[in-house]
Image (cartoon, grey):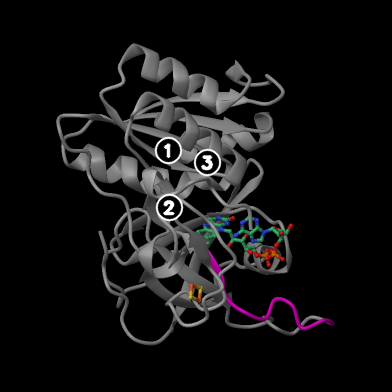
Amino acid sequence: MRTLAPLGRRRVAVRGAADVGAYRVLHAADPEGPLPQAGQFYMLAAAEGWGAGADERPYLPRAFSFLDATDGRLSFMLEDVGPGTHRLAQLGPGDELWLTGPLGLGFRAPDDGRRALLAGGGVGVPPLSAWARELTRDGCDPTAVLGFRDAHHAAGAALMADGDVTVATDDGSVGHHGLVTDLLAAALDEDDHAVVYACGPPGMLEAVRALCAARDVPAQLALEAGMACGFGACYGCVVPLAEGGYVRLCVDGPVLDADRLGHVPVH
Ligand SMILES: Cc1cc2nc3c(=O)[nH]c(=O)nc-3n(C[C@H](O)[C@H](O)[C@H](O)COP(=O)(O)OP(=O)(O)OC[C@H]3O[C@@H](n4cnc5c(N)ncnc54)[C@H](O)[C@@H]3O)c2cc1C
Ligand code: FES
């Protein structure tokens, strides 16, 4: 599902920000923007102090899935992993953002009477949270399994506002002690008439892809790649397909059917 972005970037006000465990949630006004589809993303850059560091980083905008889009307000969830996320995590009311989007292709509804099973981890939560909200609004009853490193990161599970959520942590400090794919396998053992929707680190997505392929369960994966433009111009985000050839993740994804991939690439 694709909502087309208006031409050009928009300068918008930051309305608020809060820490949720290891993550930062950022709220921005976007009164002019169209309503995005879950799984679509935005290119963000701080209006001030971007490209201004000693080594000029961050220079290009960075890609972020939206967490929520309501009443002209967009919310994002990010983890401070580098110069771009670090700068964005410093923003608060009174600051402004450059924003382009919504971009890319989002999730498609389950067909064939299948149930929606959402699987993710870490900063994979935002598109799954937005998708759970859309599914619930449309009368589906999504189930989610989420994996995190530890209790500090697992606080991010609270950002899944809709559906049943079960958590796994690597260190066992919250929920199941182990991998999110353990929970996914158990859920599919119970009932595999499902479509799996997944977002998370490449290793997790590859495990989800392989697990679903082995069980002949359809899956839609929201992938990540380094993105320089976000709208198809730079070819920096290409991923190889099982049938040969490549797609640009920013226009043909970031959500791709898992069976189009031989494996999930690590960028
Ligand atoms: C469609 C899409 C949606 C995204 N949604 C979110 C989101 O909701 N929240 C969020 O926190 N992040 C999200 N990301 C990831 C985010 O855009 C990148 O991590 C970004 O590069 C961070 O910028 P930085 O300057 O902070 O770090 P960088 O200097 O760019 O990178 C810091 C570290 O992260 C690694 N890295 C960078 N980019 C990626 C990537 N795309 N995949 C895997 N590892 C990477 C680098 O190798 C490095 O170790 C998304 C990416 C895409 C493509
Ligand atoms: S990010 Fe430039 S083509 Fe995809």
User: Would residue 46 be counted in the magenta stretch?
Assistant: no
Q: CA distance from mark 3 to mark 1?
A: 19 Å
Q: Residues within 10 Å of mark 1 (few under 14, many from 20)?
A: many
Q: Is residue 214 above or below residue 131?
A: above
Tally of numbered tags: 3
Q: Which residue is mark 2?
A: 67
- According to the picture, the residue beneath numbered tag 1 turns out to be 160
Marks 2 and 3, how far apart in space? 19 Å
- Three-letter residue code for mark 3: Leu
60 or 97, nearer to the observer: 60
Q: Among all residues in the image, which is located at the extreme front?
A: 244
Residues shaded magenta = 54-63
Q: Quadrant of residue 241?
A: bottom left
Q: Quadrant of residue 5?
A: bottom left
Amino acid type of the residue tagged 1 in the rendering: Met
Which residue is tagged 3? 205
Picture coordinates of residue 145, whole percent (x, y): 46, 28
Q: Are dots 2 and 3 in contact, CB under 8 Å? A: no
Q: CA distance from mark 2 to mark 1?
A: 9 Å
Does residue 17 appear to the left or right of 53 in the view shown?
A: left
Classed neighbour count for the residue bearing mark 3: other residues with Cα under 10 Å, few (<14), some (14–19), many (≥20): many
Estimate how packed mark 2 is, as few (under 14), some (14 to 19) or many (20 or more) residues with alpha carbons within 10 Å: many
Confirm if mark 2 falls within 8 A of ligand 1.
yes
Q: Amino acid at mark 2?
A: Leu
| Residue beneath the point at 68% across and 26% down | 170
